[in-house]
Image (cartoon, rainbow, N blue to C red):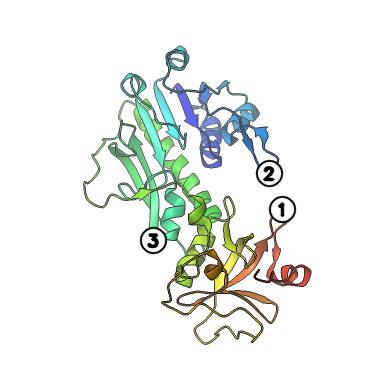
Amino acid sequence: MRLVFLGTTDFAAAILERLAQSGAHRPALVLTRPDRPRGRGRKLASPPVAERARSLGIALEQPERINDEQTVELIASAQPDAVVVCAFGALIKEPLLSAYELLNVHPSLLPRWRGAAPIERAIIAGDRETGVSILRLTAGLDSGPVCLARGEPIADDDTYGSLAARLCALSAELLLRVLDLTAARTPPAFVEQAEDGVTYAEKIEADDRTLDPSRPAVELERVVRALQPHIGARVELADGTMLGVQQAALLGEQEPADVAPSAPPAIVPGAPVVDSARRSLGIVERDGRLLLQCAPGVLELRVVQPPGGRAMDAAAYLRGRGLPVRP
């Protein structure tokens, strides 16, 4: 089939590569978002899909607006049989919605986790299963009819990185199957999504990244895994700085935190949290380990990253810097 591919993220770039390797469904044209400033230096950088398309030798365009007349004509010039959309990051409207068969690759079992961050939200929520859905793109947010879906278990130690890798492989498998069936003129049937069970995977914001010890430790451990390695969780220290958290683990019930008299007092379970200074009081050091006392539970911060520094184990961080003193 002759395809146009729309995508932006690392996840979408991996799907693009699988399509290119398939031969029969190698996209004729790739569209992605414009280059944007990134990182601490705010240097202009291309989206992952742009870099992958260049390495694959596929025609690439980066329009500012996907729905304007010029972009619509650009897609038409490629004469696609279908348009594949995966993590593009912009709302697609008419006339594109009606002009082509738009196949959307979404890493969740719809209607659960429609939206921008389905993998992260599934881990944070403690879901035992997620999956992949291939659906027809419509005007709603991931609300179109689904033609193929398959589940994938979420392991207790899954991070975004490990789960996304499996979902990416599953996405490519299901998408290629749909494209093969469509090319053979035996397309799969599309079924409307159920009205109940709809949840939304909102974009990960700064507050979602911050580990608040007024929440249970078991929830914060899931946040760390859900944001590793691409976004990263963080915790506020006594001096107001943010310490990145790359890996964390729950302490067993028989292993309570032993707080030295000189350490800041622990948060009392159930006590109200009134400001950022109070939240920072849950962090203590014990025997070269960095512990976050939560309400309830204790989370050991095992791999951390100081602002502007590299990731390191907590013991190395404590030897080199130590916990800051509360102003």
Q: Could you say which disc has been placed on residue 127 in the image?
A: 3
- Look at the image and tell me whether residue 159 can be seen: no
Between label 2 and label 3, give the one nearer the viewer. 2
**What is the secondary structure assignment of the residue under circle 3?**
loop
**What is the secondary structure assignment of the residue under circle 1?**
loop
Residue 322 is left or right of residue 13, and the answer is right
Pointer 1: what residue?
A: 308
Task: Locate residue 60: give its quadrant.
Answer: top right
Residue in the foreground of this view, choosing between 313 and 59: 313
How crowded pointer 3 is (Cα within 10 Å; few <14, some 14-19, many 20+) is rated as few
Residue 63 is left or right of residue 200, and the answer is right
Q: Is residue 315 above or below residue 140?
A: below
- Circle nearer the N terminus (1, 2): 2
Given the image, on which type of amino acid does mark 2 rest? Arg
Q: Could you say which disc has been placed on residue 173 in the image?
A: none
Percent position of residue 169, x then y = 49, 45
Q: Residue at x 45, y 36 (%)?
A: 86
Locate the N terminus by quadrant. top left
Percent position of residue 99, x then y = 33, 19
Residue in the foreground of this view, choosing between 256 and 324: 324
